[in-house]
Amino acid sequence: MKQHLILHVIAKIMIPFIMVFALYVQFHGDYGPGGGFQAGVIFGAGFILYGIVLGKEATMKIVPPPLVYTTAALGVLLYTGVGVAGMFLGGEFLNYSVLSADSVAGQHLGILLIEFGVGMTVASVMIILFLSFADYRQPESENTN
Amino acid sequence: MLSLHLSALQVVIPLLAAPLCAIIRIPGVTWLIALAVGIASSINSIAILLHINRFGEIVYSLGGWAAPFGIEYRIDSANALILLIISFIYLLGIIYAPASIKTEVPEKSQGWLYTAWILCFTGLSGITISGDVFNVFVFLEVSSLSTYILISFGQDKRCLTAAFRYLVMGTIAATFYLVGIGFLYSLTGTLNMADLAQRLPDLISQNTVAVAFGFVIVGLAIKMALFPFHAWLPNAYAYAPNAVTAFLAGTATKAAVYVFIRLTFEVFPEDYFSGFTSSHHIILAVGIFSAVITSAIAIFQDDLKRLFAWSSIGQIGYIAVGVGLASTAGVAASFLHLFNHSIMKTAIFMAIGGLFFVTGSTTTAALKNAGRRMPWTMAAILIGGLSLIGVPFTTGFISKWYLVSASLEQNFWWLAGLILLGSLVTAAYVWKIVEIAYFRKDPNVKVVRQEAPLSLLIPTWILVVANIYFGVDARFSGSMATQAANTILGVSP
């Protein structure tokens, strides 16, 4: 769709706003509606829009598959890591209260990190899903397209 | 404090290891991580068992949030036993894996295979130890999704349709289960098993409870491949990589059976399953019917993996018979057969993997001369087969003994007869294998001794020896199973 100039320009304008909004949903999730899952989907949607307009190859240049696989796993690792940190600091698995001297601050820190891990994994998985299915072509119809 | 963390570690260790494997993706390194997880979890599961025997059940509140509101892990002798089975089968499966999947899975995919495998193990451990019905659902999904991936690593292209079919069935199962616990939640406002068990007796006459019960039972029956919800299993086992089949045969359906027993006898009010709804008759009838019929179907299979997959459905039938008897002796027989069946079936599938390694095929035709060509591999299949029949000095005999005495306890002579009929049918398909492997000699072919490599034979034979050991000395398995049944049915020993 590179030849569609309007789509191209509007997408380029929209994408930064989509991503900033994703970050807002991510980090304001402690106080208002939102959180890692929603933020991840919005963040991933930014890349998917880019992919739809500029094509799969261009997207793969920005987010090479090995990188997305790694960030997807890193998100889970961050989540589990925060849980284990709670265990090392003398609490239960995923007990955030012990993460800081003040238990309320600890809860804040814990949920922030956990949600960041969730957001990272969800965004990466959204991109992986898009890239995997964008690849799919029926063998016969390839020539006719 | 550390002893309390034991329960969480069972899930946390593999949960840490799985993303690590996904990042590294180098087959050799991921295998080492998977192996380390197996060793740590096996030691952990033994520690949990010892801890429970000394101090009683372990209760662990995740995140420090106390029980009815937070998620808790609750381990007593019933889940400790299942945990032990799953951990050790996983460990042996991982030891077995590299030589086996080398011939089946391309090198660049192997890192992902181990990642999915560890995740599957995470899910199965989670299902087993969680004391929260929704948490069980989450882990059920973790294990199911990774199982679909594992199956789709198979060499035969048909593994993809097998995996997809299991995906559809597994999703339906998970939905049924979720709808069931949704009804329970709307009624009681709690998802904690112990809390549900306290609140449900007052609501026993409500139709919502009956509907929830139905949904939960059907959902879990699909996951444990209970007849007539077994259709996904034969292809899934037949087309998955051999090492994966061996692992799944010993663990996947077992965790579902455990949840089934836990929910029907402990979470739902006492006598709800057996007295109020009388649904134990259905489970009993379905169990014994499938034990006989699916064993008969197994006779006509030409592929060894598919043959033993059908046999697995039959064995799940026997476990269901024990559950359907709804007595302490019956449930103890079920737990015992869970333990015994995972030992023998994993050994058989490992041996079939060895056969595949040498002959490149798992059809019954590949068995020709196998008795002389690879005596150790064939002996493992033979001993596993004898155990399935229930020949003395194998674990199968102990299972059948418990099951028959549990049915005689309620004067079900006809049931004891049918169980023995099932054994006869089992003998028919085991004989079919023995006949081809040992007696059908091809005079034109000179048999060269060609055994499967030691890395395949050793894990197989560890299980074969365990099979014989627990068949001769059933003190450990028998007392564990009885203790588990007593805990779940609330009988003081």
Image (cartoon, coloured by chain):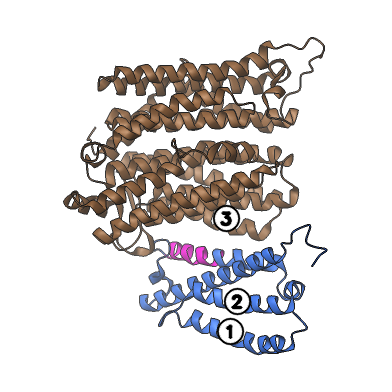
Majority secondary structure of magenta residues: helix
Badge 1 and badge 3 in a common chain: no
- Which quadrant holds residue A87? bottom left
Residues at marks 3 and 2, CA–CA distance in whole angstroms: 29 Å
Which quarter shows the N terminus of chain B? bottom left
Q: Is residue B475 above or below residue B270?
A: above
Whether the residues at callouts 1 and 3 have beta carbons within 8 Å, the answer is no
Which chain wears blue?
A
Q: Is residue B92 visible?
A: no
Tag 1: amino acid: Ile
Q: Which residue is mark 1?
A: A18
Residue A121 x, y percent position in the rendering: 57, 68
| Chain on which label 1 sits | A
Colour for chain B in the figure: brown
Residue B13 x, y percent position in the rendering: 51, 53
The disc at residue B17 is 3
Q: Is residue A24 visible?
A: yes
Q: Which residues are magenta?
A: A77-89
Q: Say which residue appears at 36% left-offset and 24% top-offset.
A: B403
Give the foreground label among 1 and 3: 1
Residues at marks 1 and 3, CA–CA distance in whole angstroms: 33 Å
- Left or right: where does residue B138 sit relative to residue B380? left
Badge 3 and badge 2 in a common chain: no
Name, please, the residue furthest toward the left.
B202
Whether the residues at callouts 1 and 2 have beta carbons within 8 Å, the answer is yes
Q: Classify 10 Å Cα crowding around label 2: few (below 14), some (14-19), many (20 and above).
A: many
Q: Which residue is mark 2?
A: A45
- Front residue of B75/B128: it is B128
Q: Considering the numbered disc 2 on the image, is that residue within a helix, a strand or a loop?
A: helix
Tag 3: amino acid: Ala
- Front residue of A2/B56: it is A2
